[in-house]
Amino acid sequence: MDDAEACFILSNRFEVDRIAADHQTILRAWAVKDFAPNCPLYVQILKPENKFHVKFADHVVCEEEFKYAMLALNCVCPGTSTLITLLIHSSRGQTAPQEAFKQRVGAFQALNREGGACSADQWHRTYRRCSANEVHHIRLEESKFFGEYQGKSFTFASFHAHKKYGVCLIGVRRLDTTNILLNPGPCHIMGGSDTCFYINISKEENSAFVRGQREPSWGGSGGNARGVHQTIYHGLTRLPVHSIIASMGTVAIDLQDSSDSSPEGQDPGSTGLGSGKGSRSSSRTEMGGANTLALPAMGDSAEERRHSIAPVLELVDGVNNPTFDLLGDQSEDEAGEEGKEDSDKDESAHWWGRHSEWVKGYPLNSPYIGSSPTLCHLLQEKMPFCCLRMDKACHHTLFEDARSYGFKNKLIIVSAESAGNGLYNFIVPLRAYYRPRKELNPIVLLLESIPEADFLEAICWFPMVFYTVGSIDNLDSLLRCGVTFANTMVVVDKESSMIAEEDYMADAKTIVNVQTLFRLFPALSIITELTHPANMRFMQFKVKDHYSLALSKLEKKEREKGSNLVFMFRLPFAAGKVFSVSMLDTLLYQSFVKDYMISITRLLLGLDSMPGSGFLCAMKITEDDLWIRTYGRLYQKLCSSNGDIPIGIYRTEAHKLPVSEVSCYCH
């Protein structure tokens, strides 16, 4: 161990007494530091209250902290658990059949063919390819991707790097600080010594660049024909399989020659690639794919004309630019007025009116030592403990169920065995200051035992957080906690059932309970934590579902190839409806080669907050937004309007089943 590059200490998560398992981990960590104090130490802890004992370790992953934050974000940002899981796993992604590379320069690598690459479903191929994306880093002055953006704004660098190379710049770190900032916004000016963090299939050092071949452009009637370089790269949404070669960690990207790619007469309000004025070829527009940001040709009809998207500025006018006020909450006054209206409607709501006054601040109490302070929406007066219980009246209020409260937003219900300290991390991300007040969902904790006073002291300052005592397998308990008014139900794995005499049977009770909920409340979105990832195939199980049977065969092929994500094509996992804490093991291993991965993941999940750093959120695309057309144009729209950086798409599709089966929608 004196000569070791690292020492990993993992806890036994299947121990009956998880606190005792942590105590053994702590003692082992102390022993390593006593014997080999210079050996880098990577520690896995189960309970958050034990984390401060191993604070000296180089990297620490606390399972319950990450688990609850991930489950919480799944409620407001669908598929967060799948997004994080795929980012922290190494995958080679989808590659093309050998025939596609016969005439291509530089296609000399042996190709990898993984399951899903030859699937009949388009979403399988896209999903497989995009699963290869990981977080990488590089110093700006040493980078071909970002070097030219020194002195430009972060938003400008992120958009143009994506437009040119298909990489997604998500964060930076200054040379003189250890703090990572995710999307610091357009007011952050890129410096040569900045470390850039970006999402891509391969890191830049393993990338090769091949110039595209010239081809004649289609000239208009005015004789404006110009030679334009062929653009082969289509962006991540419509990326043809022949444009990326991924093998042995190497990717070749075909680039256009940008020295002469802006034809005269191009619309100044858009940034197009090879789309000249008067272009007649429809294939020319498609060649740009997600990166074609120009407006339609002047000859098109008015109905087909698209809205213009503003260019992304190199520098913004100033910090006080209202367009990029990311910290402002425009719903404050509105929410306050709503609360006053509610309290004036009924005299019996006097209690409710007193607790509609909210402020922004840091939680006054934490259930354990070592939790990171996060700016949150808080109550001006803390809620009395008796009022926190939703299913029991007290001398402050006569309400006994969720219906009586008349909440305007749908509920989020969490079913857990007990109120462990980690459950605090479910509440904090959902009450963070950057979430609009009018969009906050009431949180109801369905617990099998009454919480300890210390836990109640920690949650009593948060608005619209309650608990009820009952069980998920009791229909009366579900109705009292408001299951008919809920949008999402989170079912947390029970510690007492993690140990089973027969392997994989630890999840049996949870799976059957969730199946009951699925049958009784089909409109309810259910997010489940399982002990064993292999049991994901039983979520929302249908015996005669031919589609699930086809996925089962695909999973078997994945297992034969030695994949560590054999379950990735299962619909509940792909949709972010099921999660297993064992997926987080890779995070600890990846931090060995990427020491920033834990920090970035904590920032994404809202476990840590950094002044000037962005946060993870979701935006729903409606029919009114379809004029944007492509992911590349969406990137420009978000960057130019409010400084947001898109990092992924959660797409829902109608799943057609035979007439003999009940129709359903799958994600």
Image (tube, rainbow, N blue to C red):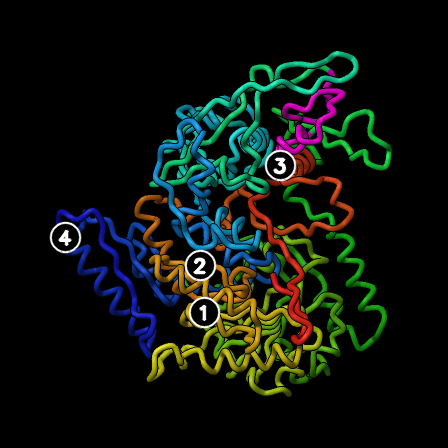
Check residue 268 for magenta coloring: yes
For residue 371, which numbered disc appears in the image?
Answer: 2
Which mark sits nearer the N-terminus, 1 or 3?
3
| Three-letter residue code for mark 4 | Met
| Three-letter residue code for mark 3 | Ala
| Residue 651 image-quadrant placement | bottom right
Q: Image height check: is 50 above or below 174?
A: below
Give the CA separation, mark 1 to mark 2: 10 Å
Q: Secondary structure at mark 4?
A: loop
**What residue does disc 4 label?**
1
Image coordinates for residue 17, horizontal then vertical, percent? 32, 77
Give the CA separation, mark 3 to mark 4: 51 Å
**Range of magenta residues:** 265-293
Give the CA separation, mark 1 to mark 3: 45 Å
Are the residues tagged 1 and 4 within 8 Å (C-beta)? no
Image coordinates for residue 310, horizontal then vertical, percent? 72, 30
Q: Residue at x 73, y 48 (%)?
A: 330
Give the CA separation, mark 1 to mark 4: 34 Å
Q: Residues within 10 Å of mark 2 (few under 14, many from 20)?
A: some
Which mark sits nearer the N-terminus, 1 or 4?
4
Q: Residue at x 57, y 51 (%)?
A: 122
For residue 153, which numbered disc appears in the image?
Answer: none
Residue mark closest to the camera, 2 vs 3: 3
Give the CA separation, mark 2 to mark 4: 31 Å
Q: Residues within 10 Å of mark 1 (few under 14, many from 20)?
A: some
For residue 421, which numbered disc appears in the image?
Answer: 1
The chief SS type of the magenta part is loop
Image coordinates for residue 8, horizontal then vertical, percent? 25, 56
Which mark sits nearer the N-terminus, 1 or 2?
2
Q: Residue at x 34, y 82 (%)?
A: 502
